[in-house]
Amino acid sequence: MARLDVLPVARSHEEPKTSRCSGCAVRDSALCASMSDTELTALRVIGRRRIVPAGQIVSWAGDASTFCANLVSGALKVTATLADGREQIVGLLFPGDFVGQLFTDETTLTVTAIVDTDLCGYPRAAFETLLGDYPRMERMLLRRTMASLNEARERMLSLGRKNAQERVAGFIFDLAARAGSRGADGLLHVSIPVSRGEMADYLGLTIETVSRQLTRLRTNEVIAFANGDRVCTIKNPEELSEIVNPD
Amino acid sequence: MARLDVLPVARSHEEPKTSRCSGCAVRDSALCASMSDTELTALRVIGRRRIVPAGQIVSWAGDASTFCANLVSGALKVTATLADGREQIVGLLFPGDFVGQLFTDETTLTVTAIVDTDLCGYPRAAFETLLGDYPRMERMLLRRTMASLNEARERMLSLGRKNAQERVAGFIFDLAARAGSRGADGLLHVSIPVSRGEMADYLGLTIETVSRQLTRLRTNEVIAFANGDRVCTIKNPEELSEIVNPD
DNA sequence: AAGCAGAGTTGATCCCGGTCAAACAGCAAA
DNA sequence: TTTGCTGTTTGACCGGGATCAACTCTGCTT
């Protein structure tokens, strides 16, 4: 059963906060950047905003694929799971990313909010029709899908051939490249948006190994932690880069 | 340097066998299935057939992305490589599959023929333009790209969370599902189109581990080999299935 | 302040898969 | 036939990361 249309109330005891998507900030999203007013309007007509609280599941593997969405703010994880519970995060989604599986009736992946997340959801069928009517949107989606595929392939290399040290360092490195901010000290600061467990599920490792590799990086003064475990300072970018891309 | 337009002659000492793609068998390909005559003609105008012998590299990582192609017959492997030589096969391509990276100026992956392969190649720019003119083709490509992405994510789960036994069994299983043929004995026979080394690069393992897992499957009479190492008979599908999808 | 729960770290140990090396099989050329 | 080359199998050994367990740290509740 798809969960994009139903905000689960088990914990919050609140009614779903959905509304016609009128502003939607979609113009900020990569899917809709450089989109004409006509196209934006068409999207708005079928769009509905939804707030998904952190930890909440957006869509279960096995659900009918009836919805897709545009991620407005927050972050989602896309996970594949084995029958015995082993789990792999196969994608992280950030603002502007497209959410959902088109052209298929059943989803095979679970989508979960890792922080409070704001989605602009569309019925899948209506969205697919829309794509046919607005080729520029379809082109945009094709671009993004190909980019996702390249990213997925990059991660196959990591999962198949890199050791724990390289994977953890690479994760920090990628985060820094994507969302690092330079502090007053001139050093890159990175907010790590996921727990150790999620890092492990993303990197194909265990929590303990991730933790050990992080302390190793810290001990070698490649990185340092500030404000608890979730903010990381890159003290030695050259060394980090060397670990990520060894000769 | 892209190699789709140049058939390397180092070994064969033959001139490139290219020709205007007049029949192209493209209608058989998934990309072009159910395509109108107009669309097919447009494709033919920019298409050129190319025969790539087994082992030949079609395109190097780092090449300018100037060509894409439709795989007519044969098989290609798409590999990602680390600076120190570690290699991961991130995709196998079979007849009907689309080859190439669109919307990007530089390729990051190497494409190699694993058997003699027949391609119908297109200049990337012309192909991208064509996609804009024929939305049905673009839709088709979007479908296929999304399917590839799903496949890539499935493989992330395998590379990140499955053990050697599960990966090897899963590989045989997938091959059987895709291209198995039932013999006179009622058993599924599968032709394995790749070497042990390529299996290892695909599965994120070493040659030795792949070999050991195959002999283990053979010893347990789950599979058997016929005609050397490249044809495999599935003697116990239930057991194989159990290994692939444990509780 | 005490108690508690969840996340993260650290330690001890084990085992799967990597590494290195040798044997083996198939095949083509001499 | 022999020789050599390449791909595959098998053996012995080792080490990186998993597993199990204890401990620390933080924030939250009472």
Image (cartoon, coloured by chain):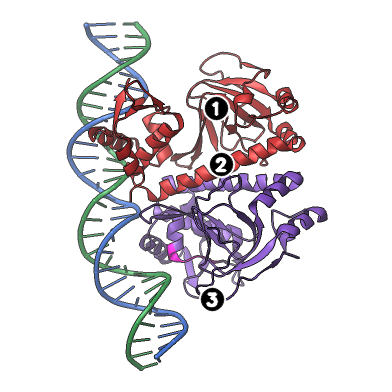
Chain colours: A red, B purple, C blue, D green
Asked if residue A188 lies in the magenta stretch, the reply is no
Q: CA distance from mark 1 to mark 2?
A: 15 Å
Closest to the observer, B24 or B177? B24
Q: Chain of mark 2?
A: A
Q: Quadrant of residue A100?
A: top right
Residue A155 visible to an observer of this rendering: yes
Point 35% across, 38% down: residue: A169
Using a 10 Å C-alpha cutoff, classify the residue at mark 3 as few (fewer than 14 neighbours), some (14 to 19) or many (20 or more).
few
The magenta segment is B191-197
Q: Secondary structure at mark 3?
A: loop
Image height check: is B50 above or below A50? below
Q: Could you tell me which chain the residue with mark 1 belongs to?
A: A
Dot label at residue A147: 2
Who comes first in sequence, dot 1 or dot 2? 1
Which residue type carries mark 3? Ser
- 10 Å crowding of disc 1: few (<14), some (14-19), many (20+): many
Q: Secondary structure at mark 1?
A: loop
In the drawing, does residue A61 fall left or right of residue C3? right
Q: Do the residues bearing badges 2 and 3 touch, measured as CB atoms within 8 Å?
A: no
Image coordinates for residue A18, horizontal then vertical, percent: 64, 17
**Amino acid type of the residue tagged 1 in the rendering:** Pro
List x then y, in percent, for residue D5: 38, 77
The answer to whether tags 1 and 2 share a subunit is: yes
Is label 1 in contact with label 3 (beta carbons under 8 Å)?
no
Q: Is residue B71 above or below residue C26?
A: above
- Numbered mark located on residue A95 in the image: 1
Q: Secondary structure at mark 2?
A: helix
Circle 3 sits on which residue?
A: B12
